[in-house]
Amino acid sequence: MKRKVGKLIIYLFAVFWAVMTIFPLIITFLSSVKDNQGINLGMFKLPEKWLWSNYAAAFSSANIGKAVVNSIFFGVTSTLIVTVVGMLAAYVLSRKKFKLRIAVYSLFIVGVMVPVHCTIIPISSLATGIGGKNSYWFIILVYVAFNLSQAIFLFTGYLDGVDKELDEAAIIDGCSDFQLLFRVLTPVSVPIISTEAILAFIYGYGELIFAMVLLTDQSKYTVSRAMLAFSGGYQQQLGPIFACIIVAVLPMIIIYILFHEKVQEGMLTGAVKG
């Protein structure tokens, strides 16, 4: 009886959580096919007239299609760099002993605590000085810089908990440092790599502050930057903004559907593979 009650509570909580997660998406979709009046007077009602033209406006005025491609490019590229460089640095900090190890690790810890807003003016000045504005490579480096400290912190802590007998066995078998890292320790670290990759991709895909400061060419806008095309001095076109949100969320949903099993499998079997 206690097991049945426990399962019932779990199922009820799962249903509640599913409703709380899906409901805002439904409201966003309904709002994406309404005008401002329909949204303000009845956001939770079905639209009296389905304004699919809001999606046309999203693609024409905000160029949301190109913005989604740009955001995916920024997110994927910065995530790959953060993951590779973070694992390399974490391997050195976790497995190598040298005098400045604690000092270097502490600097990365400090990097996690640096407020983003404090760096806007210096980064903007640097971008102006070296021609980094409207440059893909510069904004990718900015995204990498703000995610790398966290990645190194997480990867190092995880590798510290991995038994070093794995290293000894691999070295006896003739593994070099790179082979030890990528063929032995990386499979073991799949859970933490998956977690950091998700965080880094979400940051690179939806970041707004630096996109506003560093991007003025509309063809290079990210999703969050492109949505501001419907903001005016006196009013906002809410329907096209919600349409932009739906279009922007679709890639995230597709990526989750395609890769959520891989992430869960890695979390469950990552240590066994090592």
Image (spheres, rainbow, N blue to C red):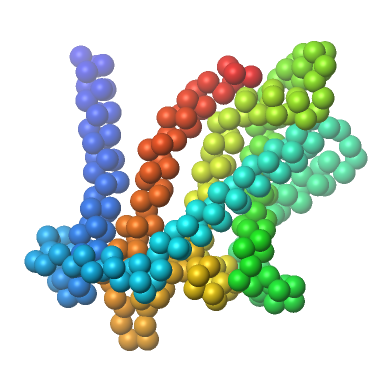
Could you say where residue 206 lies in the image, as x and y percent from the top left? 48, 58
Q: Quadrant of residue 139?
A: bottom right
- Please indicate whether residue 124 sits to the left or right of residue 243 in the image: right
Q: Where the C terminus falls, by quadrant?
A: top right
Numbered circles on residues, count: 0
Examine the rendered structure and indicate whether residue 1 appears above or below residue 213: above
Q: Where the N terminus falls, by quadrant?
A: top left
Q: Residue at x 20, y 59 (%)?
A: 30
Could you say where residue 262 lies in the image, as x and y percent from the top left? 47, 30
Could you say where residue 264 lies in the image, as x and y percent from the top left? 46, 29
- The answer to which of 69 and 42 lies nearer the viewer is 69
Q: Residue at x 76, y 26 (%)?
A: 179
Examine the rendered structure and indicate whether residue 247 appears above or below residue 80: below
Q: Residue at x 64, y 42 (%)?
A: 83
- Please indicate whether residue 84 sits to the left or right of residue 5 in the image: right
| Most distant residue in the right direction | 99
Examine the rendered structure and indicate whether residue 210 appears above or below residue 199: below
- Please indicate whether residue 98 sits to the left or right of residue 156 in the image: right
Residue 264 seen in render: yes
Q: Quadrant of residue 6?
A: top left
Examine the rendered structure and indicate whether residue 137 appears above or below residue 262: below
Residue 205 seen in render: no
| Most distant residue in the left direction | 48
